[in-house]
Amino acid sequence: MNGQTTKYYYDGDSIYVLYETDGAGTVQRQYVYSDSNVRMAMKVGTKTVFYHYNAHGDVVALTNEAGDTIAEYSYDAWGNVLKATETTNEAKQSPFGYAGYTYDKEIGMYYLMARYYEPEQGIFISVDPDPGDEDDPLTMNSYNYANNNAVMHIDPDGHWVWLAINAGFAAYDGYKAYKKTKSWKKAGIAAAKGALGGGKFKLAKKALRGAKKIIPVCQTKKLYTKRRGKKRRFQSR
């Protein structure tokens, strides 16, 4: 973007960005996740920014280490940005928004790994590589987003629809645990428990599996960044 190269390093084959570097390999931003894969914080230099979510999993605010609000956001049901107030340089660097997706401000679309999502029309701009299930006609529409139900569903990787409920509650529980204990391990457990409110949901099942084993982490001062398996690169210019 603007002639600059940004490289993204992922957690293996997952959708979770561990850190970003510039073209020279200098780390620009690092991210903290709970054990249930909720993105909880971003570190820019020596500063840490905390993410706050609503029940849909939308990023609605950012705070600094002192607890001061440095950004506020609101969206309509399909992810169109209705409000974006950012008061610090660190807040302006955060790329995450509606449903926790990566938002490309230059084109007004969300990057969902396999495809870009265009919120104004509420559709993907490319065909779903999965042909869908003939027993579920909604899944056979190659362009629709979240089975045409953006209130209840999310689609983090552009392939599979998930129920969105409890994602934000899990993140909030994790944040509270960190602020109280200063322990990312305990924060991860709290986030996993928060996601378990609707035990039948896919997210809850994933969180339950994660809560049984804490992923090893690599410490950088106050920030812990989870590392698991190989790192995967994505480069933009």
Image (tube, helix red, strand yellow):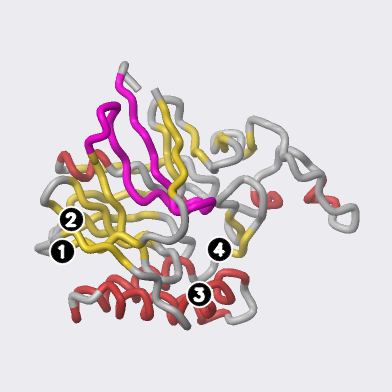
Q: Is residue 59 visible?
A: yes
Of the image marks 3 and 1, the number of the one nearer the N terminus: 3
Q: Find out whether residue 21 is within the magenta segment.
A: yes
What residue is shown with label 1?
222
The amino acid sitting under disc 3 is Ala
- Is 109 situated left or right of 42 in this image? right
User: Gap in Å between the C-alphas at discs 3 and 2?
Assistant: 24 Å
User: Gap in Å between the C-alphas at discs 3 and 1?
Assistant: 24 Å
Image quadrant containing the N terminus: top left
Residue 96 vertical position relative to residue 135 in the rendered view, above or below = above
Q: Secondary structure at mark 3?
A: helix
Q: Residues within 10 Å of mark 2 (few under 14, many from 20)?
A: many
Q: Residues within 10 Å of mark 1 (few under 14, many from 20)?
A: few
User: Gap in Å between the C-alphas at discs 2 and 4?
Assistant: 26 Å
What residue is shown with label 2?
48
Q: Secondary structure at mark 2?
A: strand
User: Gap in Å between the C-alphas at discs 1 and 4?
Assistant: 30 Å
Residue toward you, 100 or 80: 100
Q: Position of residue 197 (x, y in %)?
A: 51, 81
Residues at circles 2 and 1 in contact by the CB criterion of under 8 Å: yes
Q: Find out whether residue 136 is within the magenta segment.
A: no
Residue toward you, 221 or 48: 221
The amino acid sitting under disc 4 is Ala
**In the image, which residues are magenta?**
4-26
Residue 202 vertical position relative to residue 30 in the rendered view, above or below = below
What residue is shown with label 4?
164
Residue 95 vertical position relative to residue 105 in the rendered view, above or below = below
Q: Secondary structure at mark 1?
A: loop
Residues at circles 2 and 4 in contact by the CB criterion of under 8 Å: no
Residues at circles 3 and 1 in contact by the CB criterion of under 8 Å: no
The amino acid sitting under disc 1 is Lys
